[in-house]
Image (spheres, helix red, strand yellow):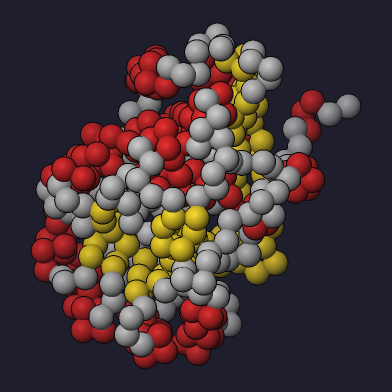
């Protein structure tokens, strides 16, 4: 079997009303899907390359102009060889950033091909540890008109859907080192006291037995993170995600040692070498790369194995289309140290409608992995076409 062609599908789902995390404003959701075709009855795999922080066209260009020519003619089963070939041929500018995102999408698609060719689900190819995982509702974003009462009602609605764990945003504060002052709508922010009020209200509503996760998206300095973290300990918060800047490894380690709740991160990090520093220096309790961002399934296997040797939980960041959601589900079901599956609850047809058979949680808050070959993805082409960003340069 040989790789014959690579295709990128840039998709954008517009929002009527933007949402905000601690730093960024989202006026739309975007995803870059990747299809890798072979000469075996046109068997192809579907992956996703992270495109956070920039236009879809940037990552699309890297895939089409830089990576695709290097993998045409390769055997898709040789995933380690292909990964290394792409990485080292682009090494001078591939030690992180956009090239790794692009490679991640290719890599996920290759594993989909292998599973289809062998008529085996990817999670079984990777180890087959379980067939379902607990999901947590990922929401609680800031939004104009959403105060303490409204966010509390939002979190309550997720419990009514069956979730037993929920996540909300914190950190949109004009504190030291938060780059919010150079971002759009920087005047839309909250004091740390207002943030604490929001979390306290949610804790009162959900009561014991429900896991509450909070996410600061790297916005806080160490002092603020410690002060707020101690309040969260008092409230029984389960986990804090990306509390300080990704590069502040010493600060993250000091925070993790100071708090009872778990520290998770960092979705904005890439490659096993960098996660090795986070893991071995005990900067984090929960290891949280993104499969479409950190190097694909092949690289995240190495990260998960290293996390296992340090008795740390692996719970990937998963906040994009249903392709990444399905890939993350397969990965979690394959490993013995898998944590919860992030299940985004914000409106997004690229997640809700792009698969012919979408994923759902069961009555106990778990998601079962489909027992279909590969990643079990069958795209709804009508939805793909609806949100596809057309290449105007090639249109007549």
Task: In the rendered view, tell whether residue 160 sits above or below residue 216.
Answer: below
Name the spot of residue 132 as percent of width and height, x first. 44, 55
Residue 41 in view in this figure? yes
Name the spot of residue 88 as percent of width and height, x first. 35, 17
32 or 245: nearer the viewer: 32
362 or 274: nearer the viewer: 362
- The structure residue drawn at horizontal position 54% and vertical position 44%, both measured from the top left corner, is 371
- The structure residue drawn at horizontal position 35% and vertical position 65%, both measured from the top left corner, is 216
Residue 174 in view in this figure? no
- State how many labels appear: 0
Q: Residue reaching furthest right?
A: 396
Quadrant location, the N terminus: top right
Image quadrant of residue 245?
bottom left
Image quadrant of residue 68?
top right
230 or 379: nearer the viewer: 379
Task: In the rendered view, tell whether residue 114 sits above or below residue 204.
Answer: above
Name the spot of residue 198 as percent of width and height, x first. 40, 84
Task: In the rendered view, tell whether residue 330 sits above or below residue 181.
Answer: above
Name the spot of residue 123 as percent of width and height, x first. 43, 40
Image quadrant of residue 373?
top right
Does residue 326 appear to the left or right of 388 in the view shown?
Answer: left
Quadrant location, the C terminus: top right
Q: Residue reaching furthest top?
A: 73
- The structure residue drawn at horizontal position 27% and vertical position 50%, both measured from the top left corner, is 337
Does residue 218 appear to the left or right of 359 in the view shown?
Answer: left
- The structure residue drawn at horizontal position 43% and vertical position 17%, both measured from the top left corner, is 78
């Amino acid at each position: 079997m040989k790789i014959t062609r690579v295709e990128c599908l840039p998709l954008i789902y517009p929002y009527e009303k933007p949402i905000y995390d601690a730093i960024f404003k989202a006026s739309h959701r975007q995803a870059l899907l990747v299809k890798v075709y072979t000469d075996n009855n046109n068997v192809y795999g579907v992956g996703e390359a992270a495109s956070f922080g920039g236009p879809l066209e940037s990552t699309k260009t890297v895939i089409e102009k830089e990576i695709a020519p290097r993998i045409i003619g390769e055997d898709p089963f040789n995933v380690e060889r292909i990964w290394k070939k792409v990485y080292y041929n682009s090494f001078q500018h591939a030690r992180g950033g956009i090239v790794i995102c692009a490679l991640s999408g290719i890599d996920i698609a290759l594993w989909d091909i292998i599973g289809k060719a062998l008529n085996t689900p990817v999670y079984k190819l990777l180890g087959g540890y379980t067939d379902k995982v607990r999901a947590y509702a990922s929401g609680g974003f800031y939004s104009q008109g959403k105060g303490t009462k409204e966010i509390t009602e939002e979190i309550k609605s997720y419990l009514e859907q069956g979730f037993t764990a929920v996540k909300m945003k914190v950190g949109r504060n004009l504190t030291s080192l938060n780059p919010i002052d150079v971002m759009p709508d920087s005047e839309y922010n909250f004091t740390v006291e207002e943030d604490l009020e929001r979390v306290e209200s949610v804790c009162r509503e959900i009561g014991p037995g429900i896991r509450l996760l909070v996410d600061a998206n790297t916005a806080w300095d160490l002092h603020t993170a410690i002060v707020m973290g101690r309040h969260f300990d008092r409230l029984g918060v389960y986990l804090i995600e990306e509390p300080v800047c990704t590069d502040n490894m010493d600060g993250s380690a000091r925070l993790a040692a100071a708090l009872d709740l778990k520290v998770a991160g960092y979705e904005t990090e890439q490659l096993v070498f960098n996660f090795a520093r986070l893991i071995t220096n005990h900067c984090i309790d929960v290891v949280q790369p993104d499969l479409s961002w950190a190097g694909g399934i092949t690289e995240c296997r190495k990260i998960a194995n290293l996390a296992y040797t340090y008795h740390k939980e692996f719970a990937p960041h998963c906040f994009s289309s249903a392709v990444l959601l399905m890939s993350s589900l397969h990965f979690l079901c394959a490993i013995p140290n898998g944590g919860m599956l992030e299940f985004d609850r914000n409106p997004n047809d690229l997640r809700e409608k792009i698969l012919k058979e979408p994923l759902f949680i069961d009555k106990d808050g778990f998601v079962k992995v489909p027992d279909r070959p590969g990643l079990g993805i069958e795209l709804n082409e009508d939805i793909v076409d609806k949100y596809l960003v057309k290449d105007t340069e090639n249109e007549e």
